[in-house]
Amino acid sequence: MVVDPLIELRDVNKHFGQLHVLQDINLAVGRGEVVVVIGPSGSGKSTLCRAMNRLETIESGRITIDGQPLPEEGKALAKLRADVGMVFQSFNLFAHKTVMANVSLGPVKVRGLKKEEAERRSRELLDRVGLADQASKFPAQLSGGQQQRVAIARALAMDPKVMLFDEPTSALDPEMINEVLEVMQQLAAEGMTMVVVTHEMGFARSAANRVVFMADGRIIEDRSPDDFFTDPRTDRAKDFLSKIL
Ligand code: ADP
Ligand code: MG
């Protein structure tokens, strides 16, 4: 059991038409915990992540972040999205803004920082993800791995309580995967609370406190990486692991 969870989902359900995409989901993520979510394509992993910062609504159940229910709209929702940083497979940077603007605009608009302060912090963050010298470039001038590191810096610039990663390396050429995973490893080591959907089992083994395995909209295993990888309990998990390992 997780004491004092930062994220808590209780009996969460959602349909897309006939499809029961989230079925009685119960999940708690503690402060500083790294939870890796794995499972076959279509099992509901992205929907689960998106529900946690209200990019998707739910039909029943309850989601709280730091004890607070997810707000419906307006400023409170913008603040929630800042508290729950999200990094997508497809980077989602603003194409017509510089790297510096991509990272520094959110803190000015949502957190109310002065432009100079936001840019000073953004430079620190770009330095942390190894991109100090790329601040004046546009996204299209960067490699996929660099763009994804900008996306991570942009989410971090909001000073989030938790970071969600939805297959952050799936769109990258193989040689760029590690540079992104290393940034994530470092964040995990610094104590960031993280929920990470990934097929990178090396990352799961080394960085995760827990592995959550999803199939058909349900969480069917929620265990330590050691237990899960050496002794998966369900046939679904065994089958999945035999295909990816
Ligand atoms: P995963 O990330 O595990 O691959 P998703 O959460 O993206 O799974 O999707 C779970 C299921 O819900 C899939 O069958 C997908 O086609 C369906 N789905 C996802 N988003 C929508 C949507 N906006 N409308 C209808 N069906 C959707
Ligand atoms: Mg997905």
Image (cartoon, helix red, strand yellow):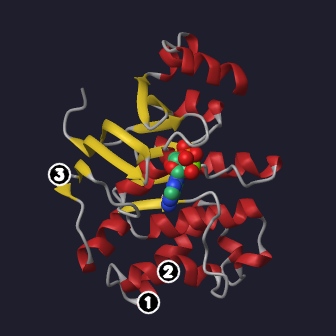
| Residue 36, image x, y percentages | 49, 37
| Residue 166 appears in the figure | no
- SS under mark 3: loop
Answer with mark 3 or mark 1, whichever residue precedes in sequence: 3
Mark identifier at residue 104: 2
Indicate the secondary structure of the residue bearing disc 2: helix
Q: Residue at x 61, y 80 (%)?
A: 94
Between marks 3 and 1, how big is the CA–CA gap? 31 Å
* Residue kind at label 1, given as amino acid type: Lys
Element class at badge 1: helix
Report whether 45 appears left or right of 192.
right
If you read the primary sequence from the N terminus, does the residue marked by circle 2 or circle 3 appear first?
3
Query: At x 67% / y 82%, what residue is drawn?
Result: 95
Q: Which residue is mark 1?
A: 115
Q: Residues within 10 Å of mark 3 (few under 14, many from 20)?
A: few
Q: Is residue 115 visible in the rendered structure shown here?
A: yes
Query: Which callout, 2 or 3, points to the residue nearer the camera?
Result: 3
Of the image marks 1 and 2, the number of the one nearer the N terminus: 2
**Mark 1–mark 2 distance (CA, rounded to whole Å):** 8 Å
Q: Which mark is residue 67?
A: 3
Rendering coords of residue 228 (x, y %): 51, 18
Residue 51: where, in percent of width, then height?
Answer: 37, 55
Question: In the picture shown, does residue 29 fall above or below 168?
Answer: above
Extreme-front residue of the structure:
18
Q: Are marks 1 and 2 in contact (CB under 8 Å)?
A: yes
* Relative vertical location of residue 95 with respect to residue 59 in this rendering, above or below: below
Nearer to the camera, 41 or 104? 41
Q: Is residue 124 left or right of residue 82?
A: right
Determine the image quadrant of residue 159: bottom left
